[in-house]
Amino acid sequence: MKFQVNRDAFNEAVSFVVRVLPQRIPMPILNGILIEADANALRLSVFDYEVSAQVEIVAKVENPGRVLVSGRLLSEITNKLPNAPIEVVLEGNKVQVVCGASKFALLTMPVEEYPNLPELPVTNIVVSGEDFADAVHQIVPAVAKNDHVMTLNGILFEVEEKAISLLGTDRHRMAVKEVAWSGKNDLVGYGAVVPARTLTEVAKTFGHQGELTVSVDKDEARSLVAFKANNKTITSLLIKGRYPDVKEHLPSEEIPEFAVVNTADLIDSLRRVGLVLESDAPVRCQFDEGKLTLEAFDNEVAQASESLPLELTGTPKTISLRPRYVIDGLSGVHSEFTRISFMNKGNPNKPSPVLISAQAAKADKGSDNYRYVLQPHLLQR
């Protein structure tokens, strides 16, 4: 095998596929990156039986072939190479990488032992890469981290008639966002749980790629989802198991009591007041006509309070919320103002959730369908 390739294109391709692999892989061979040179194309692939990534770039191929080398080592090398064309040659059991005055020799890995990459599903729909990436960024903060219930470590992906619904929860809060799709309606009604880590990488990779093709295999035995745009592809196994039925907590109609507050101002205030709190202690939030007062008094060493203007519809409310959770929700609001709606579950012994959503202007609710539901704490006595 022998080929010449542009340094920047090769480095970007290597970095992309290596980034998809988890840090810890049980089998050393799965740390490898598969390089296949064929005609005037160069394909780079990784696969660990759960997630795969592949990218195809243009190269001048003199001798076709395929080889397997350490992915992370190759990535470190290509990232440091000078700005010059790269020549890669397979000589015996070593791959020679030459770029300008730099020359590296990498020991090959047994390519015949490398697993076959999964075949892409044929049933697909198309979404905007930017819109899908934005939705993932809005949902991920609410997803559980390393929960013993595996499905909570993923994002519920449901294809509805006009949009894909993405939902994440960690039991204390949940976030929901919908993204419009186009294509055949073969997948309407399809639902699956996709690992949050995979979708985070998809958002990072395809956020500026224009159209993003999402393919799924409806055969439960395979449980595979694929994301493809231009020359890049990411596939992932789905998380098996039943996702908790938390959508029932979403209101079906507009909530009559709510407060409207400036998004950036509330984030800044919560960060300042939260400085005196220990661990993840909550802040007392008092919603009065014209004013929101935040109070933090978790310990005897320091206390803090701050007020900011708001517009209140309904009766005054006092609730206790974790600053970090509120900030996570506000970070997903892409508008100047935020609407905080007070849901009424009818249980006087348990505080009702609040719904955070976008508010384009003080008088007009935003068109963004992002919704973030947060369960308050019992008020401190």
Image (spheres, rainbow, N blue to C red):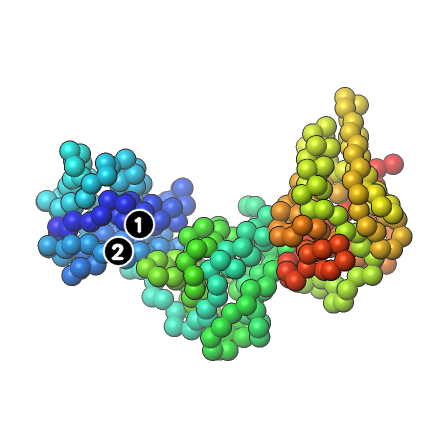
Report the residue that reaches farthest toward the top: 301
Location of the C terminus (image quadrant): top right
Q: Which residue is mark 1?
A: 13
Q: CA distance from mark 2 to mark 1?
A: 8 Å
Q: Tell me which residue sits at (13%, 46%) in the image.
A: 89
| Residue named by callout 2 | 57
Mark 1 lies on a secondary structure that is: helix
Would you say the residues marked 2 and 1 are in contact, meaning their CB atoms lie under 8 Å apart?
yes
Disc 2 element: strand
Rendered location of residue 295, percent (x, y):
80, 35
Of residues 250 and 31, which is closer to you in this image? 250
Instruction: Give the residue type at disc 2.
Output: Ile
**What amino acid is labelled 1 in the image?**
Ala
Q: Along the line of sight, which residue is nearer the eye, 294 or 224?
A: 294
Callout 1 environment at 10 Å: few (<14), some (14 to 19), or many (20+)?
many
How many numbered discs, if any?
2
Q: Can the viewer see residue 233 in this picture?
A: yes
Residue in the image at 10% along x and 54% along y: 62
Q: Which mark is residue 224?
A: none
- Rendering coords of residue 229 (x, y %): 38, 61
Q: Which of 230/148 is in front?
A: 230
